Image: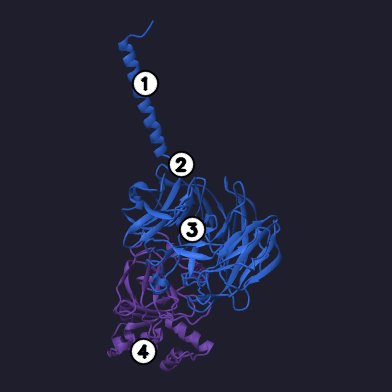
Chain colours: A purple, B blue
């Protein structure tokens, strides 16, 4: 099946059939360049490809099955034992992974930068399964029924739902616009989830302090993320 | 030959020196055995480090955990522990092993362990001697009630299996066990069910279930549905929610507040199960939320003579679950269980959502309070006089007193 702009937009609107979805995702994560993109004569395709991926790899995740890779060693957390951040979730997703890829493609090959290319969506529409995402800086397991949006310029993550973050180096992330940066330490595993008050507030807790959460949430996290 | 004065003087000097030597040796020996001390204090430090520090007394003085405490491996230890007769017990939910620890020479060291496969502890109960009943749920789905019966001395398993309790069904997907209490040849199990509402949100059934199981077969005999409140008691490795009075009647508190049941519309209350009964007393319900406390509470400790202490939250002071732990908003109330009256104890606001923070010993209730303004102290409530005073201070790197226990 040919993956073109129309199909990608259809994918973004979640109107694809299972077969179309599979085709788009195969295209997205195959690592192969798109034959539809014709480079000017004399240009080295491999060089462009490497440059493109280098540019986006710091924030743009590549789908990967990370089950069972939770880190267990490293320094103790700099993060406070139990952190909370006021609400911010706006309810609007700016772009899907697919459109960001297209935007980057246009930016690099077409030279027409677009305002949406700083956002990466990490939505998980499944009611049961976890979505595993790996980037250069951290691994993320996105919980069921979760909407997430990463602003790569500001290091800001908007979240509605739950995720588990395991940094591969010390990273500073902000949850919600205008809030303080939080240091996520190498080798630690953090659980990030919405508060129960319905106001979108965020709770961040180190995995080893799971006891600080209500037991029912502990059970849901252990059951969902298999940590 | 009689000793000369000079010889006698020499002999006495020798004896005196020897007595000092042996005395200092024995003192040193005592200091080297922190596990012999009466109390154990679990401290969370300001930088995330944790210690367990032993103490001879909670009545006064000052302890710096970073100097006097045994440092804990925070990747292995948490405060959900069982403390008894100088030993500590904890299930490591990551590696499925149940460890026995002790304090020795300033260190917190493992002495033994046993594998408890696919298990999460909800409740522990000593059954006479060193027999320990652990009741919990099968992991990772938390939908099947399981138990392990073991000898604490050497952690040998006596028996294990499933209990005849209905799995969550319909809209419910997990459950919580609040208590598992022996009643002759029966075991009473209090529990409820939970519904996931999407994301991390959840709610709890409006019903408390109490099933009488035939012991040791663990087959169900009868189940009571109690509708007056929900989320009976709680995980007692972290905090106490039950007690027996002098008549052998059993009391437990329900915890529907945001921190446990997340059914804030339901009232927190105290139930009674008479000594020879298998169901709650229909004539007894101490409605805590309807009292002047007008809030939910978590944590219940018996003082004797029909009096108890509870730890209640202040919903006007915290914003949500996220700051429930870090904001000082907890108050302690003295309850008269018969008259069903409450009296606020004049203590600073306390912080930490669930904590084992009260010990009752020889007419004194020792209450550990983490005050944002006044620091971390153990307060002494004289039960007969009704007076309060500050006792032991936890200073230095102390952020939270997470639990206080009788070690011996």
Asked if badge 1 and badge 3 are on a common chain, one would say yes
Q: Residue B80 — which label?
A: 3
Give the residue pinned by disc 2: B36
Can see residue B261? yes
Q: Chain of mark 3?
A: B
Give the residue pinned by disc 1: B15
Q: Quadrant of residue A173?
A: bottom left
Cα–Cα span, label 2 and label 1: 29 Å
Question: Is A214 on the left-hand or right-hand side of B138?
Answer: left
Give the residue pinned by disc 4: A37
Q: Position of residue A48 (x, y in %)?
A: 31, 81
First in sequence: mark 3 or mark 2?
2
Q: Position of residue A20 (x, y in %)?
A: 50, 89
Q: Position of residue B117 (x, y in %)?
A: 58, 58
Q: Chain of mark 4?
A: A
Cα–Cα span, label 2 and label 4: 76 Å
Element carrying mark 3? loop
Cα–Cα span, label 1 and label 3: 50 Å
Mark 4 closeness class: few <14, some 14–19, many ≥20 residues within 10 Å: few
Cα–Cα span, label 3 and label 4: 58 Å
Element carrying mark 1? helix
Cα–Cα span, label 3 and label 2: 22 Å
Q: Chain of mark 2?
A: B
């Amino acid at each position: 099946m040919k993956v073109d702009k129309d199909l990608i937009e259809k994918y973004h609107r979640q109107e694809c059939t299972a077969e179309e979805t599979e085709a788009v995702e195969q295209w997205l994560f195959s690592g192969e360049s798109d034959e539809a993109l014709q480079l000017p004569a004399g240009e080295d395709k491999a060089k462009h490809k490497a440059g493109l991926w280098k540019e986006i790899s710091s924030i743009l995740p590549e789908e990967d099955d990370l089950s069972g890779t939770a880190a267990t060693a490293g320094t103790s957390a700099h993060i406070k034992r139990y952190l909370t951040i006021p609400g911010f979730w706006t309810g609007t997703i700016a772009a899907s992974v697919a459109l960001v890829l297209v935007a980057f493609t246009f930016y690099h090959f077409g030279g027409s930068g677009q305002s949406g290319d700083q956002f990466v969506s990490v939505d998980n529409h499944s009611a049961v399964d976890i979505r595993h995402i790996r980037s250069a800086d951290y691994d993320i397991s996105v919980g069921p029924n979760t909407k997430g949006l990463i602003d790569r310029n500001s290091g800001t993550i908007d979240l509605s739902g739950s995720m588990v973050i395991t940094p591969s180096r010390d990273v500073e992330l902000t949850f919600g616009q205008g809030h303080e940066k939080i240091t996520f330490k190498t080798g630690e595993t953090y659980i990030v989830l919405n508060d129960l008050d319905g106001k979108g507030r965020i709770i961040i807790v180190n995995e080893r302090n799971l006891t600080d959460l209500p037991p029912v949430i502990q059970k849901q996290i252990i059951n969902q993320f298999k940590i | 030959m009689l000793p000369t004065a000079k010889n006698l003087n020499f002999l006495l000097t020798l004896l005196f020196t020897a007595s000092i030597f042996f005395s200092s040796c024995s003192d040193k020996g005592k200091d080297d055995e922190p596990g012999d001390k009466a109390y154990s204090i679990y401290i969370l430090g300001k930088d995330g480090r944790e210690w367990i520090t032993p103490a001879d007394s909670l009545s006064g003085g000052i302890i710096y955990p970073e100097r006097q405490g045994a440092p804990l491996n925070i990747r292995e230890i948490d405060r959900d522990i069982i403390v008894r007769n100088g030993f500590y017990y904890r299930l490591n939910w990551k590696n499925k092993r149940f460890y026995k620890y002790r304090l020795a020479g300033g260190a917190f060291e493992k002495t033994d362990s046993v594998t408890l496969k696919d298990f999460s502890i909800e409740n522990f109960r000593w059954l006479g001697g060193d027999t320990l009943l652990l009741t919990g749920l099968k992991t990772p789905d938390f939908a099947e009630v399981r138990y392990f019966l073991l000898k604490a001395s050497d952690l040998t398993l006596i028996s294990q299996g499933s209990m005849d309790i209905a799995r969550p069904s319909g809209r419910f997907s997990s459950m919580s066990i609040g208590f598992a209490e022996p009643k002759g040849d029966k075991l009473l199990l209090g529990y409820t069910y939970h519904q996931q509402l999407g994301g991390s949100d959840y709610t709890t059934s409006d019903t408390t279930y109490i099933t009488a199981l035939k012991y040791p077969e663990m087959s169900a005999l009868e189940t009571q549905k109690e509708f007056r409140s929900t989320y009976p008691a709680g995980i007692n490795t972290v905090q106490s929610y039950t007690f027996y009075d002098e008549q052998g009647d059993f009391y437990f508190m329900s915890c529907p507040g945001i921190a446990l049941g997340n059914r804030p519309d339901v009232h927190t209350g105290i139930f009674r199960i008479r000594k020879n009964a298998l169901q709650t007393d229909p004539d007894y319900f101490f409605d805590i939320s309807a009292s002047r406390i007008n809030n939910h509470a978590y944590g219940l400790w018996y003082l004797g003579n029909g009096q108890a202490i509870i730890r209640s939250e202040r919903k006007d002071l915290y914003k949500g679950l996220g700051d429930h732990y870090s904001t000082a908003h907890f108050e302690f109330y003295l309850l008269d269980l018969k008259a069903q009256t409450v009296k606020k104890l004049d203590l600073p606001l306390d912080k930490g959502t669930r904590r084992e923070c009260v010990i009752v010993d020889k007419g004194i209730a020792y209450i550990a309070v983490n005050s944002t303004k006044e620091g971390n102290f153990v307060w002494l409530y004289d039960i007969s006089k009704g007076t309060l005073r500050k006792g032991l201070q936890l200073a230095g790197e102390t952020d939270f007193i997470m639990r206080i226990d009788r070690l011996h």
